[in-house]
Amino acid sequence: MKIFKSLYFLTLFFLFSNCGNKKSSHDSVNLIGDNHPTVQSTSSIDLEVYTFDEFSKFLNKKDDRVYVVNFWATWCAPCVKELPYFEKIKKEYEGENVEVLLVSLDFPHLYETKLKPFIVSKKLKSKVVALDDPDMNGWIPKVDSTWTGSIPATMIYKNNARKFFEQSFTYDELNTELKQFLK
């Protein structure tokens, strides 16, 4: 199983590390209000990067909040497709002790050229962190023993109650699962 996971991630690395990004600028222009352009530089994004040991604190909080932790990457089409649903959850449950954390599994050499521009262009409001720990065989089962390592994957938890999903979501599916933790 460990060999399979290693081969899986090695294959993903070679497949996606060669994808070209035609966008050469690190800046993104957003139009706000009266069509006055505002330039937001990707250098203004303070991306938190963690090893798994550092990151694990996000998986074990016990403060009566509901945590929605989504593992994704910019090169993962199903991940990108479902991101607006996590953003909608963040907005709709703003005052209800719900926190959304988007955990990027993008390759470290792509943080500046792919991940940060993506965060700016998609105007992500949820907290985005990067998990940079090459020992996937070590940390994947620590997230959930059933996780094969494929993404998207999501954990929803509150204190000691938790559910893990190795799937993509529609908004309604995600909202239904979240509501079970708000009862």
Image (cartoon, helix red, strand yellow):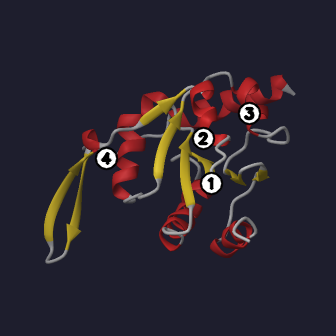
Q: Earlier in the sequence, mark 1 or mark 4?
A: 4
Q: Residue at x 59, y 63 (%)?
A: 82
Tags 4 and 2 touching, CB below 8 Å: no
Examine the image and state in which quarter residue 89 appears: bottom right
Q: Nearer the viewer, residue 10 or 135?
A: 135
Badge 3: residue crowd in 10 Å (few <14, some 14–19, many ≥20)? some
Badge 2: residue crowd in 10 Å (few <14, some 14–19, many ≥20)? few
| Residue at numbered disc 1 | 67
Q: Residue at x 37, y 59 (%)?
A: 123
Whether residue 92 can be seen here? yes
Mark 4–mark 3 distance (CA, rounded to whole Å): 32 Å
* Number of the front mark, 3 or 1: 1
Q: Nearer the viewer, residue 173 or 115?
A: 173
| Residue at numbered disc 4 | 23
> For the C terminus, which image quadrant?
bottom right
What amino acid type should be assigned to the residue bearing mark 1? Tyr
| Residue at numbered disc 3 | 140
